[in-house]
Image: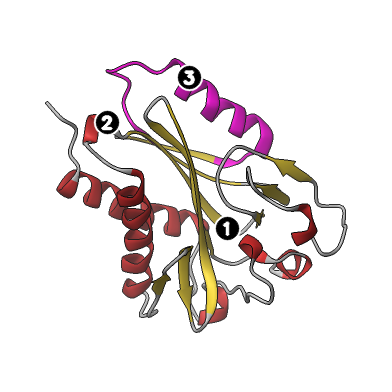
Amino acid sequence: MVVESLGLVPYEPTWQAMRELTATRGPETPDRLWLLEHPPVYTLGLAGKIEHLLEASEVPVVKIDRGGQITYHGPGQAVIYLLIDLARRRLKVRELVTLMEQAIIDVLADWNIAAERRAGAPGVYTDDAKIAALGLKISRGCSYHGLSLNVDMDLAPFFRINPCGYEGLRTTQLADMGVETTVIEAHRRLARRICELLERDYPVAQ
């Protein structure tokens, strides 16, 4: 696994880079985790309905190729993109989603935050609010896109949407849960746990 910290990077070029890597990777191409933040942007999934954008603003809306509805990315949010060859790890899509959710739940537990997944609503929730979102695209048997964990950010843009298509869904973040940390530290903990779970349960086939 190659873990790369990209810093604060614009959304669309990063999305295109994920697509290009996935389209050109071969059997020996290593899996990657990209750790990054984005400037403010709304992303609308393949089946996304624009009516879930409740209020226009200066934040751009980008229609993309992952599953799911609309979500928001912005500074202070830890984003990890998982570029993984599923077949090589004998890993199914549902299993990858569960692994991502479990990694987030485990990391939050280290900060004494009790979190859970919800059936039919990918992501991680605590205190009846969403703290992390998930979205994937599978192409040529490989994944891209990934997860976002709210660390210490401006949550106001979430009020202008139905997050992930759910009316009235509250969002929260680590800072509001009393956790003083950084995006860099959240990235470090999440990446380590994702790698641990992958190597334990879905090692690369030899």
Q: Looking at the image, which is closer to me, 175 or 120? A: 120
Q: Give residue 125's position: percent from left, percent from top.
A: 47, 73
Determine the residue positioned at 43% across, 53% down. Answer: 187
Q: Which residue is mark 3?
A: 23
**Percent x, y for residue 143?**
42, 36
Quadrant of the image containing the N terminus: top left
Indicate whether residue 51 is drawn in magenta: no
**9 in magenta:** yes
The image quadrant that residue 93 belongs to is: top left
Q: Give the labeled residue for mark 2.
A: 87
Q: Which residues are magenta?
A: 7-32
Count of marks placed on residues: 3
Cβ atoms at labels 1 and 3 below 8 Å apart: no
Secondary structure under badge 2?
Answer: helix
**What secondary structure is found at the residue carrying circle 3?**
helix
Give the residue pinned by disc 1: 77
Which of the marked residues, 1 or 3, is nearer the chain's N terminus? 3
